[in-house]
Amino acid sequence: MNILMEKLAHWFSDLFDIFHRPFLRLIPLQTFRYLVAGGANTFLGLLVYFLTYRLLFRESIFDLGFYAFKAHSASLFCSFLVTFPVGFFFARYVVFENSLLRGRVQLFRYLLVCLFNLALNYILLKTFVEVLNWQAIFSQLITVILVVAFSYIAQRNFSFRSQKNQTNC
C-alpha cells in the first residue's frame, strides 16, 4: 500500500511542481503545494457539503434518534469524513514530505488540528447560519477561508514539523 501512495504522491508532486515554476520567485514550493493540495481538498469538501446539504439531507433535519442534526451541520460532518483522509495524504506525502515525525504521530497530530478546525468551522457555521441568518453555503465558504490560514501554520509547525521549521518555532 505504501508503494502505491508514494507513486501517487510523486505524481502529484511533479504535477504541482510544473505549475509552481512561474511562481518560483513569489512563493516557496511547500506553500504552493499546500495551497494547491489544500485548495483541491477544500473544493472537494465544499462539493461534498453542497451535495449532501442539497441532495442527501435536503436542507432538513437529520435525526439519529439520540441527536438531531440540522442539514448544514450534518453536511459539515460528511464533508469532514471525506476530506480528512484526502487531506492527510496530501499533507504527509506531497506537502510536508520532509517531516521526520513517525506516521502515526503525524496522523494523531493531524487529527487534533483537524478536530480543532472542525470545531471552529462548526461554531462559525452555526453562528453565521443560525444567528446571522446567512445562507448555509455562503457561510461555509467564508468559514473555510477563515480556517485555512490557521490550518497551514498548525500543520507546518505541529503535525508535520521538520528539523528545518523546528528551529523557526
Image (spheres, helix red, strand yellow):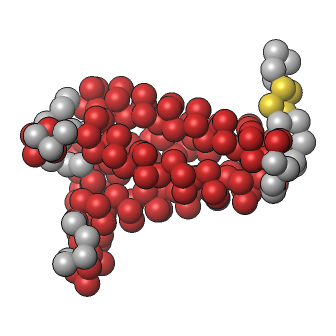
Residue 159 figure quarter? top left
| Residue 158 in sight here | yes
- Residue at horizontal 20 percent and vertical 77 percent from the top: 24
User: Which residue is drawn at the image coordinates 54% and 57% (left, top)?
Assistant: 145
In the image, taking residue 166 as reference, residue 27 lies left or right, namely right
Q: Residue furthest bottom?
A: 22
Percent across and percent down for residue 162 are: 15, 41
> Which residue is depicted at the point 72% across and 60% down?
138
Q: Is residue 149 left or right of residue 94?
A: right
Tell me if residue 15 comes above or below residue 95 in the rendering: below
163 left or right of 143 in image = left
- Say which residue appears at 47% left-offset and 52% top-offset: 148
Q: Where's the N terminus, which quadrant? A: top left
Q: Position of residue 118 (x, y in %)?
A: 56, 36
Provide residue 64's location: percent of width, then percent of height: 81, 23
Q: Nearer the viewer, residue 119 or 78?
A: 119
